[in-house]
Image (tube, helix red, strand yellow):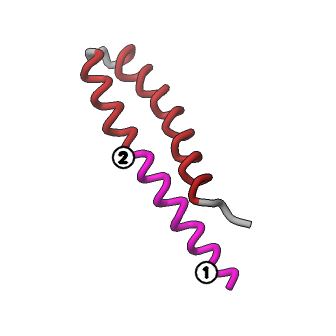
Amino acid sequence: MGQSRTESLLESLANQVVGISYAIVLYWYVFDFSVAEGFATTIVFSILGVIRVYVIRRIAEWRRKRKEG
């Protein structure tokens, strides 16, 4: 059995939580961005990341279903 669309969305959101954690450490503490710069960058990449992971997962599920018949 494959992954539902809801499960794909939850997976992509979970990946973003991890990504945001990295962004907070890197942007705010390592690269010394201002809070506003770090927040804006994090939001943009988070939105793009959710879309990217969701689309990749849905393509993988489409291919899996196609192979199963």
- Residue 31, position as x, y percentages in the image: 32, 19
Amino acid, disc 2? Leu
Q: Nearer the viewer, residue 29 or 37?
A: 37
Residue 58: say if magenta: yes
Q: Secondary structure at mark 1?
A: helix
Specify the farthest residue to the front.
Answer: 6
Residue 47: say if magenta: no
- Residue 10, position as x, y percentages in the image: 58, 46
Tell me: residue 33, above or below residue 46.
Answer: above
Disc 2/disc 1 C-alpha distance (Å):
27 Å
Which numbered circle lies on residue 66?
1
Image quadrant holding the N terminus, namely bottom right
> How many numbered discs sit on the rendered protein?
2
Q: Quadrant of residue 65?
A: bottom right
Residue pointed to by mark 2: 48
- Taking 47 as reference, is 7 left or right? right
Q: Nearer the viewer, residue 22 or 4?
A: 4
Q: Earlier in the sequence, mark 2 or mark 1?
A: 2
Specify the farthest residue to the right.
Answer: 1
Q: Nearer the viewer, residue 58 or 6?
A: 6
Q: Which residues are magenta?
A: 48-69
- Taking 48 as reference, is 40 left or right? left
Tell me the residue at 28%/29% (across/down).
Answer: 40
Q: Quadrant of residue 4?
A: bottom right
